[in-house]
Structures are given as C-alpha cells and as structure tokens.
Image (cartoon, grey):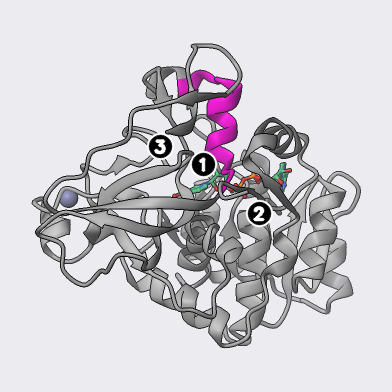
Amino acid sequence: MKALAKLHSEPGIWMTDAEMPEYGYNDLLIKIRKTAICGTDVHIYKWDEWSQKTIPVPMVVGHEYVGEVAAMGEGVRGFEKGDRVSGEGHITCGHCRNCRAGRRHLCRNTVGVGVNRPGAFAEYLVIPADNAFKLPDDITDEMAAIFDPFGNAVHTALAFDLVGEDVLITGAGPIGIMAAAVARHVGARHVVITDVNPYRLELAVKMGATRAVDVSKENLRDVMTELGMKEGFDVGLEMSGVPSAFRQMLDTINHGGKIAMLGIPPESVAIDWNQVIFKGLTIKGIYGREMFETWYKMASLLQSGLDLSPILTHQLPIDKFQEGFDIMCSGESGKVVLDWTS
Ligand code: NAD
Ligand code: ZN
C-alpha cells in the first residue's frame, strides 16, 4: 500500500510502498480517507533532537485522520464495515491503575500512533477498536480529520469553567486558535490570544478571539487597560511552549487564577514561584484528550454550532504532500489536510 514514511535519518518524508498492516482479534482495519499534518509530524519531518531520540526508521508516521472500517478482528463489537471513524492516537495499556480506574488519558504506558507504532499516513491503518470513535453523519471528513488536535484544544479549554471569564491564550498555533473558538462558544467574555505570527493572529480573530496581540509589537498590559480589565485574566491556556509566554501569563493572571498547560517547552523553564504561591494559582498539565469524554464533547460542540471551518486553510491531494509540509513549515497556515482518495 501507499504510505508516507520516515525512511532515512535526515530531514524529509518519503512516499513508499509499505506492507499492509495486519489486524488482530480486537483491532479495526481502517481505510484512510483524509489525514492532517500535526506539529509533531513537522518535528519528525525536520528530524529534530526529539525525533532522532524517539522515532525508529523506517516508520509510517501521522495520527490525525478520518477513514472507514474496512475489516475487523473477531472480538470487535459495536462497529460495522463501512463505519466512518477517527481514532484516539494514544494507545493505552489497560492494566495500569489509571486505565483500570477509567482515566485512560493518564495511562503511564501510552504508545503513540505514528510515533511509536505505524501511523495513519497510509492507505490503511490498524488500531484497537477501543481507540476508534464513530463519527456522526453531519461532521465532514475534513473536520473529522483534525479531531486529534481539536481534542487537545477542547481538553485544555474545558479544564476550567470559562463562563463569563476573561481568558488569556498564549500561542495562536492551530490548537490555540481552536481553543479560542471553543472558549467563545462556551461563554467566555474576553478571549485574548498572543503570538508573534500576524497570519495566525488574524486567523484567531476570524475564529472568535476578541483581541489578538502580537507580543513582539504590543504590550499585553496596554491591551488589558484597553479592555477595561483592572485585575487580570481569570483563566490562562498555555499553548505555545514558549517560556516567555508562560511568564507573561503568570504576570497577568489574577489572584486565584487557573492555568491549563498544553504547550511543550523545549527544556526546563525557570519561573517566579512566588507568583504561583502568593496569587494562589492552580496549574494543571494537559496531555492528549480524555477518552472518550473529549471526543463526545467535540462532536457535540460542532453540532451545537461551533464553526471551525476557517482553521482548514489548505486541502491537497496526497500526491502534493511535499507542498503540504512546506506550507506547515512556513507557519502561514491553519491545518493542512491531505486527501488519500483523490
Ligand atoms: P504551534 O507550534 O503551531 O503553535 C505555537 C505558537 O506559539 C506558534 O504559532 C508560535 O508562533 C507561537 N509563539 C511563539 N512565540 C510566542 C510568544 N512569545 N508568545 C505567544 N506565542 C508565541 O503548535 P500547535 O500545534 O498549535 O500546538 C501548541 C502547543 O501544544 C505546542 O507546544 C505543542 O508541542 C503542544 N502540544 C501538546 C500536546 C499535549 O498533549 N500536551 C498535544 C499537542 C500539542
Ligand atoms: Zn495504562
């Protein structure tokens, strides 16, 4: 089958002819329709330090996808051939304490699709049926293909109550922008988003942020004054992984504020802990998506009118994958979706 793989230990990604994956007793074989390029795929493409340590070569990558069930193992219940599915990219162990308590997103033995095991950038993918999510008919293929990062946005944005609150989002990457849309949809008051990339800040406003701030040109405190915010933000969603952005959040959050942290800093970050202590802050780390609460909420948010379509900035046939990666690397994009059926 056709597959997009990391074939060499150097920057790049290559189309190859890979073995069809075999499915076991509890697995689904999924025929892929559309995939999206994640920031993680860009790290793997660029072959940075993390990828060199993590990704075995050769490896079919990718974990953002939509497809249809082509076949299944004998033990599978609840799915039929032809069902349209996306899937949770974190395969959990099922026997650790958190898995057994129903907190699968906190499994300590998580294995990543397209990171530690063959991924979705291929004509076919195998995952445990337990990891698949059956899609309602009214959700489009291209939207379903980005459920994985949309889930990061939803999991983070819904970590704390946002109704009537002033929210600061640091980082207007695709996930930060989707989080801004979710925050507005669920009733936040001001949703201020920061970045240093004008293209993305503009997209964030299109998707519901009430104010976008280019922190390389504007002072966040001036913006707070402009908005009449005398005390500070109630909730912070850190979605950049940039240390200075997190420090700015600690500076501008109100006493008693709550911070959900999704962004992954490249190395350890020093902060002024006095701000955490004397402001009485709550800081919560966010990893992945809740299985499957976040997935149900994603579907329901779309069905209740959340419009994420502007984030789908580029849709290309799979043969133009190189163009897709170039666009992602440029930073001038929302999500880039590749079509495997055209
Ligand atoms: P992204 O890299 O596209 O977005 C990060 C954004 O931060 C970029 O637009 C960048 O321009 C911006 N930025 C740079 N400097 C800034 C500054 N000083 N202030 C504010 N913003 C600044 O990433 P993404 O795909 O949207 O993901 C967001 C973050 O979440 C990344 O750090 C990613 O690694 C992380 N992530 C974590 C999980 C998890 O499970 N915890 C899952 C997916 C992604
Ligand atoms: Zn586990």
**Would residue 153 appear left or right of 283 to someone viewing this image?**
right
Instruction: First in sequence, mark 2 or 1: give its number.
Output: 2
User: Do we see residue 104 in this rendering?
Assistant: no
Crowding near pointer 2: few (<14 within 10 Å), some, many (20+)? many
Q: What element carries label 2?
A: helix
Crowding near pointer 1: few (<14 within 10 Å), some, many (20+)? some
Q: Position of residue 102 (x, y in %)?
A: 18, 66
Spatial CA distance of label 2 from label 1 is 14 Å
Magenta region: which residues?
35-51
The quarter of the picture where residue 332 lies is top right
Q: Where is residue 169 in the image (x, y as percent from the top left)?
A: 66, 61
Q: Which mark is on residue 114?
A: 3
Q: Position of residue 334 (x, y in %)?
A: 72, 53
Kindly report which numbered mark, 2 or 1, lies closer to the viewer in this rendering. Answer: 2
Q: Disc 3 marks which amino acid? A: Gly
Mark 1 within 8 Å of ligand 1, using the beta carbon: yes
User: Do we see residue 123 in this rendering?
Assistant: yes
Residue holding disc 2: 174
Is 48 included in the stretch rendered in magenta? yes
Q: Disc 2 marks which amino acid? A: Pro
Secondary structure character of the magenta stretch overall: helix
Mark 2 within 8 Å of ligand 1, using the beta carbon: yes
Q: In the image, is residue 212 above or below residue 119?
A: below
